[in-house]
Amino acid sequence: MLVNKKIITQKTDCTKKTQSKFEENEERYKVFVDNSIDAFYLTDFSGKLLDVNKAACTILGYSREELLKLTVSDIDIGFTKKQILEFIKNLEFNVPIIVNSYHKRKNGEIFPIEARINTFGTKEKPFLISNVRDMTEQKENEELLRKSFKKYQDLFEKSKDAILIIKNGRFVDCNQAAVELLLYKDKSQLLNFYPSELSPEFQPDGRNSVEKADELMKIAVEKGSHRFEWEHVKSNGEIFPVEVLLTTITNEDGSQVLHTTWRDISERKKDEKLQKALYAISQEADKASSINELYKSLHEIVSTLMPAKNFFIAIHNSETNIVDFPYFFDEYDPSPVKRIFSNGLTEKVLKSKKSQIIKRAQRIKKTAIIKSTGHYPKQWVGIYLGFEGKYKGVLAIQDYENENAYNQEHLKILNFVSEQIVKTLDKRYADETLRKSVIELMEAKKQLEIINRDKNRLFSIISHDLKSPFMTLLGISQMISEDMDSMSVKEVKEMTSTIYNSTQNLYKLIENLLNWSRLQMDSFQVTPTKLNIKDIYKSVRTLVKLSAEEKGILINDKLPKVFVLADEDCVKTVFRNLIGNAIKYTEPKGTITISCKKHTPYIEISVEDTGVGMNKKLVNKLFSISEVISKKGTLNETGTGLGLIICKELIEKNNGKLWVESELGKGSKFIFTLPMH
């Protein structure tokens, strides 16, 4: 029994009812104490144990009888006997206190306790009652909690990822990694910020950062956690991407915080961009319709990796020693012309075969080819492109504003990208060369077919038109040779006239054949001079006057005094052929009109007749050697059909054009232009 009635109670003159009530309460107290899981000690002020409950025996490992032979100093090792007695002596009456100490079990095991000590009785005869609780499990839990908290603190502070705590939408704590990631001096500069305040106004998807941040935090609270990508802003204004993990944590008091982890994914994003750029470059080789379009696409792709507003590609031909700029985009300078290999920045890279970054405008100015605008970039980057064969190149980007626009990281990226560019361009150049070769072969084949067809047609003309006058000459000369003595003067005159006409036609044919062959072999020399077109016509008119008079054809001269720049013989030949053709295909008593118009910088000259004209089909074949047409005139005049073809080529040799306007039965109009002097 813990409490001795004779010790704790004083003799009073209580009534039986009061005594009964006291005994009832005392009994309840004894039941409570004996069944408690905590130990109860009753001691006097000398520290001697006067009574203990069952729990005390269980906790200490002693029997009740053994404990009642001991003092508090026998089981407590947290204080000395002297300290215990001094402590008891200083206790205030009826004022409970709590003491933490260590007790020793019978088996020698030491364990932590928490004792709630209270005094009762009288000042003359006081007692102590101690409610002692074994704190081993709690201490272990506290130690585990302490270790767990320390481990969490270690993880929190030593984590390479930024960790921040959000409460009520604001940052209330963060680790050192977060401070360093955002380039702040200490965490105090970050606390009480909203996440959106450390973000650009808009995220990459175009969403407003404030609205989107609220939405994502709400999702994390509802689901327990949420992972996503986000862009934040460092203290220097640099925007960078992070992967965010928000985890909801509920505190003991029911309040919630968001445990936030940021992982900087700048390098991952760079790698993704780089891989995407390399893939895009490889695809462009097949997709771009032209080499210029490919260069433009390369410019756009490089611009996704770094600032590349000013961008050009230079190609050096080692055989010709010429540097060409097939693609050039600059905010100040126009595209440079081809140049001999010199001492510019481009040549500097080509000579060294090494990619370079050149800073400072003055240094660039010394090594750059003189610029017409006088604007020099503050930083210039040249990437060497080692193509196969005789070509080598440089890809260059430059910045006119920022001397630190590019660094070694950019150079590394560009060198990496350049390998793909070289492969792509090598493939494209090979494809382009092959395509050009195929086209050239096809063109050569067409030209060969045309030449072969023209040759066959020419031989046909020669065999037909050259044979006819010779046969006529042979026949007449035989008749004269055999029947000269019996022929009249009239017959001789007719025969000599026939001989003259045949000889004239033969001369024209040979002259046309010679002129045409000279034109085809590019041995025909043109010497442009100042010519009065009216004077040229007059010199030709005497040659065609007789033919026109024989058919009673009127030639109207409406030419003014105008000057052209052309070869005199060429113009005479054209006039002679065109007027001769007009006479040939105009009915007797018809009219031919020679006129001209000024169309600066050309003079347009026309020979118009009232002859038989031509249909559209005939007009389309008129200037083709493969479709040479030799149609007899209105009085059965013959011709070779080569005259108009020669006229067209002669006019084109003199930088002019020749064409025809005609309608069957209504005459023809041949028009040609010559440069005005």
Image (cartoon, grey):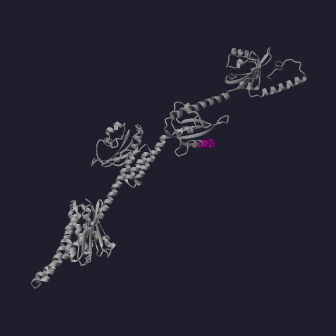
Q: Quadrant of the C terminus?
A: bottom left
Q: Quadrant of residue 76?
A: top right
Q: Quadrant of residue 217?
A: top right
Residues rendered magenta in the picture: 215-226
Q: Position of residue 19 (x, y in %)?
A: 88, 23
Would you say residue 216 sits in the magenta stretch? yes
Q: Position of residue 170 (x, y in %)?
A: 60, 36
Would you say residue 146 sits in the magenta stretch? no
Q: Position of residue 337 (x, y in %)?
A: 31, 48
Identify which residue is drawn at 43% across, 43% down: 307
Identify which residue is drawn at 73% across, 15% down: 89
Q: Quadrant of the N terminus?
A: top right
Which of 569 and 68 lies nearest the eye of the viewer? 569
Which of 448 and 202 lies nearest the eye of the viewer? 202
Q: Position of residue 164 (x, y in %)?
A: 57, 35
Instruction: Work out whether residue 517 can be spotted.
Output: no
Name the dominant secondary structure of the magenta segment.
Answer: helix
Relative to 662, 266 lies left or right:
right
Relative height, residue 97 to residue 468 (above, below): above
Relative to 564, 3 lies left or right:
right
